[in-house]
């Protein structure tokens, strides 16, 4: 069989897309390799949500170019959001590329590779899928082995929110939901192959069921039905949009034991003027009220978020509002970034008025503040017993296994004979950052 090397940048949607391409290529005669030098096909699945991510990708391809020069038969492909955003312009920057393919054509990866091998010509495939429905057909013959203890399942693609800073609607398109029966079928197959936890994915999972379905099902109802699938031990979802978070969805955290006690809920800023300029559609108080309601129905729920500092026009006092909101919520972790303009977004037309030095300073303060919050939350677990889903072997000295607790903290543990997919009680002895360490208790 031929060998494919896959590298993935960006969000969990990209991770899921890479896994899907790997599966489709397996059925087309490719096995995965972790050695670029051995590959017949190299695919880099890209992100364009931040300028820094783009810079890393261009740097990576600079290192891949010599492999192409050494082996002209090597197919070198760039897929994902950067491919959708830049299209043919990428050939001007990197003429050695063979394939440029946007996210809408993940299902066509094997066809694209075959066409390039037959014609010897570069291919740009960044048109939009015009079909109303979003479908990821279940393959009759999955690859050997199991998908791991935790598996991703895409349920919706695209986003209709058009936040002023965000390029996702321009790289992933408008919202389309998969039919519920197709989702159930995929989950059942994953569970039959050994998955214990399913993570439902979308740019905005709360919008599931609103567009692109013949038989619409609201998101909270999807959760209840997935929870009934035999053999499934844990259920998660990401990412959520605060304005679309319904009362019924909050109650699902109360009602479903299988739904883990963690939620990623991006807020971006704690200041109302900035939130309005970002077109987020909610105020800081509305976000805090939602969090309060969640905590009342799901005590102990862990919350993570996204934060942007240095948005055009952000003042020092407006930045301080973000730190205050972080304190009020008590996030267990955050993805924190300094603002960078993205091509085609409304915010890119604004003067990037916050100096880079100020952005850097604010980002450092945000990182330090989150580190304090994370330490405070971690101390709550010290000496306590947590339930951990084993994901695999640990590379951390002194520990044999790694996994996650319901609140999505990474846990390293020792003192047990286990395997991936086991769920075990662990006594937490210490912590470092967003990682807990401990020992397994006798079963």
Image (spheres, grey):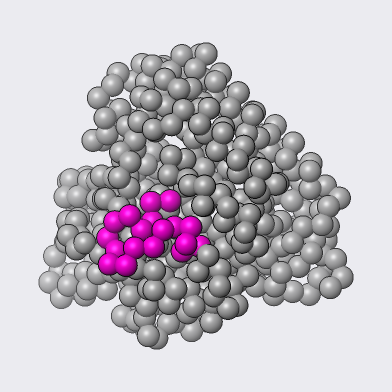
Asked whether, in this view, residue 84 is left or right of residue 244, the answer is left
Residue at 43% x, 44% y is: 244
Residue at (19, 56) in percent of width and height: 128
Residue 266 lies in the magenta-colored region: no
Q: State which region is magenta.
A: 206-223
Q: Quadrant of residue 96?
A: bottom left
**Residue 331: which quarter of the image?**
top right
Left or right: 386 in relation to 340: right
Q: Quadrant of the N terminus?
A: bottom left
Q: How many marks?
A: 0
- The percent coordinates of residue 32 (x first, y second) are 43, 73
Q: Indicate whether 160 appears above or below 281.
A: below
Q: Is residue 290 in sight in this rendering?
A: yes
Between residues 301 and 376, which one lies in front from this camera angle?
Answer: 301
Which is nearer the eye, 34 or 100? 100
The answer to whether 15 is drawn above or below residue 203 in the figure is below
- The answer to whether 345 is drawn above or below residue 74 in the figure is above
Q: Give the quadrant of the C terminus.
A: bottom right
Look at 25% across and 44% down and name the residue there.
170
x, y percent for residue 277:
36, 24
- Classify residue 49 as left or right of residue 224: left
What residue is shown at x 60% (from left), y 77% (from top)?
Answer: 231
Depth order, front residue of 376/133? 133
- Give the percent coordinates (x, y) of residue 279: 35, 31
């Amino acid at each position: 069989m031929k060998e494919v090397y896959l590298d993935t940048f960006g969000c969990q949607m990209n991770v899921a897309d890479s896994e899907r391409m790997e599966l489709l290529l397996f059925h087309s005669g490719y096995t995965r390799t972790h050695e670029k030098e051995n590959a017949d096909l190299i695919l880099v699945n890209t992100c364009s949500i931040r300028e820094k991510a783009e810079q890393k990708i261009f740097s990576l391809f600079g290192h891949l170019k010599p492999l192409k020069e050494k082996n002209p038969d090597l197919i070198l492909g760039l897929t994902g959001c950067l491919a959708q955003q830049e299209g043919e312009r990428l050939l001007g920057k990197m003429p050695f590329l063979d394939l440029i393919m946007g996210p809408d054509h993940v299902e066509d990866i094997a066809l694209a590779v075959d066409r390039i091998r037959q014609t010897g010509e570069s291919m740009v495939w960044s048109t939009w899928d015009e079909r109303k429905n979003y479908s990821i057909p279940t393959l009759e013959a999955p690859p050997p082995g199991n998908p791991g203890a935790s598996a991703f399942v895409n349920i919706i693609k695209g986003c209709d929110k058009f936040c002023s800073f965000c390029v996702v609607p321009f790289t992933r398109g408008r919202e389309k939901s998969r039919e519920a029966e197709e989702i159930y079928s995929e989950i059942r197959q994953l569970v039959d192959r050994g998955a214990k936890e399913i993570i439902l994915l979308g740019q905005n999972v709360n919008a599931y069921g609103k567009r692109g379905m013949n038989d619409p099902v609201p998101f909270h109802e999807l959760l209840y039905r997935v929870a009934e699938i035999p053999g499934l031990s844990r259920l998660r979802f990401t990412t959520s949009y605060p304005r679309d978070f319904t009362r019924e969805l909050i109650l699902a955290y109360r009602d479903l034991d299988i739904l883990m006690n963690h939620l990623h809920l991006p807020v971006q800023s704690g200041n109302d003027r900035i939130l309005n300029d970002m077109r987020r559609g909610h105020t800081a108080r509305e976000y805090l009220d939602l969090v309060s309601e969640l905590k009342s129905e799901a005590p102990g729920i862990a919350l993570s978020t996204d934060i942007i500092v240095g948005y055009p026009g952000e003042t020092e006092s407006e930045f301080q509002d973000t730190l205050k909101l972080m304190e009020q919520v008590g996030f267990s972790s955050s993805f924190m970034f300094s603002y960078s303009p993205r091509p085609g977004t409304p915010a890119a037309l604004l003067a990037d008025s916050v100096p880079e030095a100020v952005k850097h300073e604010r980002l450092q303060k945000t990182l330090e503040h989150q580190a304090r919050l994370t330490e405070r939350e971690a101390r709550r677990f010290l000496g306590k017993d947590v339930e951990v889903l084993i994901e695999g072997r640990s590379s951390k000295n002194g520990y044999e296994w790694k996994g996650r607790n319901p609140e999505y903290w990474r846990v390293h543990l020792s003192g047990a004979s286990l395997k991936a997919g086991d769920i075990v009680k662990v006594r937490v002895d210490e912590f470092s950052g967003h990682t807990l360490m401990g020992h397994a208790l006798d079963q």
